Amino acid sequence: MRPPLVSAQGIAVACALLAGGASYWVLAERSDTHVADAGFWFEDVKFASPRLGAPVTSAEIETIARVARSELAKAFQGLPITLSDRRDATYRLRVVQRLRDQRLRRDLEIAGESRAVSGFGGQGAVSFDFLASGAVAYAPVNADRASMIEAIGRGIGRSAVHEFTHQFLPTAPIHDSTDAQSYEYQSAARSEQYYGELRWNLAWPLLQRRLN
Ligand SMILES: [Zn+2]
């Protein structure tokens, strides 16, 4: 049976794969079986927009991936989670070119989605197209290319935080957060997804209880 779709975040709107062994960028401080094992990686994606100018280069994809990984590490700091690019991790999230809402017949693009079964793991994806378009659309008028590239990484990383939270807490109503500056907020169609800081709302104590 296919696990239920627990999330479809947001309604609106170069390859960074590593060869060889798995790459870890956050290892939990303890090494028991209760450490959540989260794999996050980019599929082969590309992006161009008139405001950005030339298409995103593979070096810029690397920057975007680095920023996204650091957003994940920052958000989950203090929890027993190991973050890597492992495709066989218990909790998995891919960055794909685009995502369509599978719950609707309409051809609607979404920012992210996840499927999970409590205590068994989960899998999901976030959309490069949606989040890169958002980072460019919400950019301040004087934003240069480098700051928009960084914002794409933040947007993807924050969407990844949101989706992993669904996977860790499949039954928690995290969309109840009405704080647009929170990771739990249900839509990625907001400037806070890409610019400024985000904080935790209702999910943090639940994550501490679930994962510790
Ligand atoms: Zn969600």
Image (spheres, grey):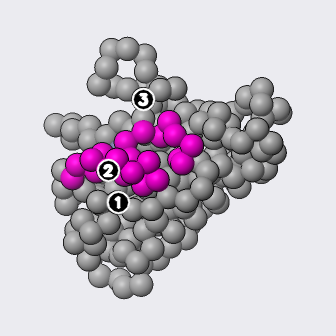
Mark 2: few/some/many CA within 10 Å (<14, 14-19, 20+):
some
Q: Are marks 1 and 3 in contact (CB under 8 Å)?
A: no
Task: Identify the residue position indicated by label 3 in the image.
Answer: 11
Mark 2 and mark 1: span between their CA atoms? 6 Å
Labelled disc at residue 53: none
Q: Quadrant of ligand 1?
A: top left
- Name the kind of residue labelled 2 in the image: Ser
Q: Which corner quadrant of the image does residue 78 belong to? A: bottom left
Please give the count of numbered marks on the rendered protein: 3
Closer to the observer: label 3 or label 2? 2
Q: Are marks 2 and 1 in contact (CB under 8 Å)?
A: yes
- Name the kind of residue labelled 3 in the image: Ile
The answer to whether residue 165 is magenta is no
Labelled disc at residue 177: 2
Place of residue 22 in the rendered image (x, y in percent of width and height, measured from the top left):
53, 65
Mark 1: few/some/many CA within 10 Å (<14, 14-19, 20+):
some
Q: Earlier in the sequence, mark 1 or mark 3?
A: 3
- Residue range highlighted in magenta: 172-193
Q: Secondary structure at mark 1?
A: loop
Task: Identify the residue position indicated by label 1 in the image.
Answer: 201
Q: Secondary structure at mark 3?
A: strand
Q: Earlier in the sequence, mark 2 or mark 1?
A: 2
